């Protein structure tokens, strides 16, 4: 493990971004480790510091996601969750644009497959809640929109991390 050259934050073993400042990780490591990291970074990540269009907010989100466990991160399971601050947890799970616009925000980000998948998941959950509400005699129809809004809000940042940094284009 090394330290960020910009802010001095300790980096995880496989971190591609600094959790402190969001800078692409390059550690003071042996030449072999540095060469291996550069090969991995070139094959799996987009360079965040080369002005490729990622604002500071996204670089911070990417760094928080990597600190929480990288690709394995989901809002219900954080492998390194105890190391995260409240701000870092919000960076991972909160996206107001995704909450308000849902699948349209995903389409804007170029993630149409995931927009379809999450929309179908939300419809299934809405149908199950509607049936349960009818069986219990409780009207839930006015609140079903919240289910899809929360699903999109919670998943948007990690899904975009997978698309932008890991170059994944899957349905899930």
Image: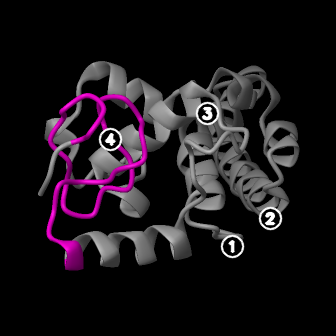
Residue pointed to by mark 2: 113
Estimate how packed mark 1 is, as few (under 14), some (14 to 19) or many (20 or more) residues with alpha carbons within 10 Å.
Answer: few
Residue 17 at x, y percent in the picture: 38, 47
Q: Mark 1: which secondary structure? A: loop
Between the residue at mark 1 and the residue at mark 4, the CA separation in whole angstroms equals 26 Å
Residue pointed to by mark 4: 18
In percent of the image, x 87 and y 42: which residue is there? 108
- In the rendered view, tell whether residue 103 sits above or below residue 144: below
* Upstream in sequence: badge 3 or badge 1: 3
Residue 34 at x, y percent in the picture: 27, 69
Q: Mark 3: which secondary structure? A: helix
Foreground tag (4 vs 2): 4
Residue pointed to by mark 3: 153
- In the rendered view, tell whether residue 163 sits above or below residue 51: below
* Upstream in sequence: badge 4 or badge 2: 4
In percent of the image, x 56 and y 26: which residue is there? 56
- In the rendered view, tell whether residue 90 sits above or below residue 161: above
Residue pointed to by mark 1: 170
* Upstream in sequence: badge 1 or badge 4: 4
* Upstream in sequence: badge 2 or badge 1: 2
Q: Is residue 140 visible?
A: no
- Chain part drawn in magenta: 4-32
- In the picture, the quarter occupied by the C terminus is bottom right
* Upstream in sequence: badge 2 or badge 3: 2
């Amino acid at each position: 493990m090394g330290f960020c050259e910009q802010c001095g934050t300790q980096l995880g073993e496989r971190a591609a971004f600094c959790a402190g400042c969001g800078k692409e990780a390059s550690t003071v490591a042996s030449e072999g480790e540095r060469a291996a990291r550069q090969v991995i970074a070139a094959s799996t990540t987009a360079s965040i510091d080369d002005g490729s269009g990622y604002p500071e907010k996204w670089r911070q989100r990417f760094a928080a996601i990597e600190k929480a466990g990288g690709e394995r991160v989901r809002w219900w399971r954080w492998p390194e969750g105890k190391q995260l601050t409240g701000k870092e947890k919000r960076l991972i799970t909160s996206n107001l644009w995704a909450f308000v616009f849902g699948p349209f925000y995903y389409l804007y980000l170029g993630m149409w497959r995931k927009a379809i998948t999450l929309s179908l998941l939300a419809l299934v959950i809405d149908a199950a809640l509607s049936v349960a509400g009818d069986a219990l005699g409780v009207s839930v129809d006015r609140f079903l929109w919240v289910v899809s809004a929360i699903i999109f809000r919670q998943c948007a940042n990690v899904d975009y991390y997978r698309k932008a940094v890991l170059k994944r284009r899957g349905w899930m």
